[in-house]
Amino acid sequence: MKLSFSSRLSTLRHQKQSVLCVGLDPDPDRIPTHLRPHLDLPAAVIQFCSEIISATSDLAIAYKINFAFFEALGDEGIKVMREVLGKIPDHVLTIADAKRGDIGNSASFYARSVFDDLSFDSVTVSPYMGKDSIVPFLSTEGTCAFVLARTSNPGGNDFQLLKCDDQRLFERVADQVGTWSFDTPGEGGLVVGATDIDDMTTLRERHPDMPFLIPGVGAQGGSAEDVMQAAGSGPVLVNSSRAILYASDGPDFAEKAAQAADKTRTILGS
């Protein structure tokens, strides 16, 4: 029997005294310029991500690969993603930040792609199309589907705060995820942005054992100390992308990334 995602997260958290997830968002315009004269763009992305991973893998317990940045590379994108995935140590958790959300039949093929083919440990998904778009991502043992609940982007307020009977919509989404994943091989988790601490606190009180993926710390302005207080003792991964990836645009970028990751991990605690 495969260990649950939360069990693996808990073990890594204890071993590394860390809840840090490093987001891999390789923006071609921000890749250190010294890499570009000697490499084409796909090779430069691989080199950049590989050095970031090597420099931070003793500090991070997960890496979140943002599909958009790899898909934008065109035909080489998936090949580059596979190369980068191969650089991540086997014991470290991986997140496919793909934000999938489609009808059940399509969702089952998306799930097959991220879990069976690419072998990610978890994936981000959108709940807008309801239960049948989520359940296929809950069907693989040992994995987690992080469902968008209360996101950190400004536009999140457009729908997430709307009242649904006596609840706000993001609260209803979270409750439904808990129901849908009650007895499935995979786990349901929530994406909860770091920029609204009160709402994070509310969600943690309602769902003490559900894994949270928390973006928005660092470049988006979320406070690491406030996040950890709100996240409580439940399973949690706190993602930082730009603040770590682009700590320097020079030849020392990997060293500076490690320093930024260590600083973030220390502030977050364990």
Image: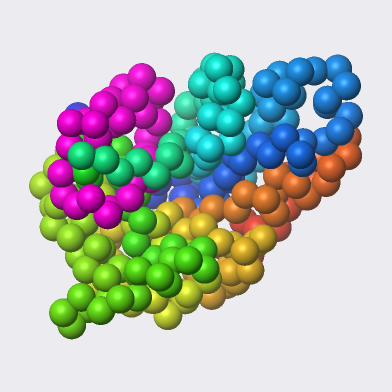
Q: Is residue 226 magenta?
A: no
Observer able to see residue 138: no
Residue at horizontal 57 percent and vertical 22 percent from the top: 74
Q: Residue furthest left?
A: 183
Q: Position of residue 64 (x, y in %)?
A: 51, 41
Residue at horizontal 68 percent and vertical 21 percent from the top: 42
Q: Position of residue 87 (x, y in %)?
A: 59, 24
Along the line of sight, which residue is nearer the eye, 239 or 5?
239
In the depicted structure, whether residue 168 falls above or below residue 40: below
Q: Is residue 119 magenta?
A: yes
Q: Position of residue 122 (x, y in %)?
A: 37, 39
In the depicted structure, whether residue 94 falls above or below residue 129: above
Along the line of sight, which residue is nearer the eye, 102 or 175?
102
Residue at horizontal 43 percent and vertical 66 percent from the top: 156
Q: Position of residue 173 (x, y in %)?
A: 24, 63
Q: Look at the image and name its color scheme.
A: rainbow
In the figure, is residue 37 to the left or right of 244? right
**Quarter of the image holding residue 96?**
top left
In the depicted structure, whether residue 104 falls above or below residue 16: above
Residue at horizontal 53 percent and vertical 37 percent from the top: 68
**Quarter of the image holding residue 201?**
bottom left
In the figure, is residue 179 to the left or right of 197? left
Observer able to see residue 107: yes
Along the line of sight, which residue is nearer the eye, 83 or 27?
27
In the depicted structure, whether residue 107 falls above or below residue 112: below
Range of the magenta residues? 104-132
Quadrant holding the N terminus: top left
